[in-house]
Image (cartoon, helix red, strand yellow):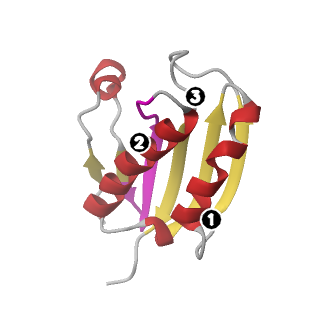
Amino acid sequence: MAIKRISSGGPFEAKIGYCRAVVAGGFVHVAGTVGEGATVQDQCRAALATIEKALAEAGASFPDVVRVNYYLPDATEFEPCWPILLETFGANPPAATMIECNLIDPKFRIEIELTAHLPAG
């Protein structure tokens, strides 16, 4: 099976040398993704929109996600994202981890990284 690389054209991809997602071995591995916005909820929605586009290009969608990692510089900002995440994954919840850590730029409040299983077909 060939490896497919998916780029979203984001500025960090070119600066750092990575791509938004890699399709390999029946899985879609999506790199840590941040989003623009004034609030953590805005950034969460924006990150999920970028991820959704990468998943679609790979032939997958949110119900195919099996693992997700959330990275936040302030763990108290995770709870305001819960309704957004429940709306996104509700009926098909993935295994998940939340880690409090610094992100690449202090303006970012959440980074989301995930893995999806490609549907058969």
Query: For the residue labelled by badge 3, is the local secondary structure a helix, a strand or a loop?
Result: loop
**Sequence-earlier tag: 2 or 1:** 2
Query: Residue at 52% of width from left, 24% of height from top?
Result: 108
Q: Which residues are magenta?
A: 23-37
**Sequence-earlier tag: 3 or 1:** 1
Q: Residues within 10 Å of mark 2 (few under 14, many from 20)?
A: some
Say what amino acid the circle numbered 1 marks: Pro
Q: Residues within 10 Å of mark 1 (few under 14, many from 20)?
A: some
**Residue 86 image label:** none
Judging depth in this view, the residue of 81 and 16 nearest the camera is 81
Query: Residue at 37% of width from left, 50% of height from top?
Result: 49
Relative vertical location of residue 54 with respect to residue 111 in this rendering, above or below:
below
Identify the residue under disc 1.
Answer: 94
**Residue 46 image label:** 2
| Real-space CA distance between mark 2 and mark 1, rounded to the nearest whole angstrom | 19 Å
x, y (%) of residue 54? Answer: 32, 53
Judging depth in this view, the residue of 120 and 2 nearest the camera is 120
Q: Are marks 2 and 1 in contact (CB under 8 Å)?
A: no
**Residue 109 image label:** 3
Query: Residue at 30% of width from left, 62% of height from top?
Result: 56
The mark closer to the camera, 2 or 1, is 2
Judging depth in this view, the residue of 1 and 65 nearest the camera is 65
Looking at the rendered image, the quarter that the N terminus falls into is bottom left
The mark closer to the camera, 3 or 1, is 3
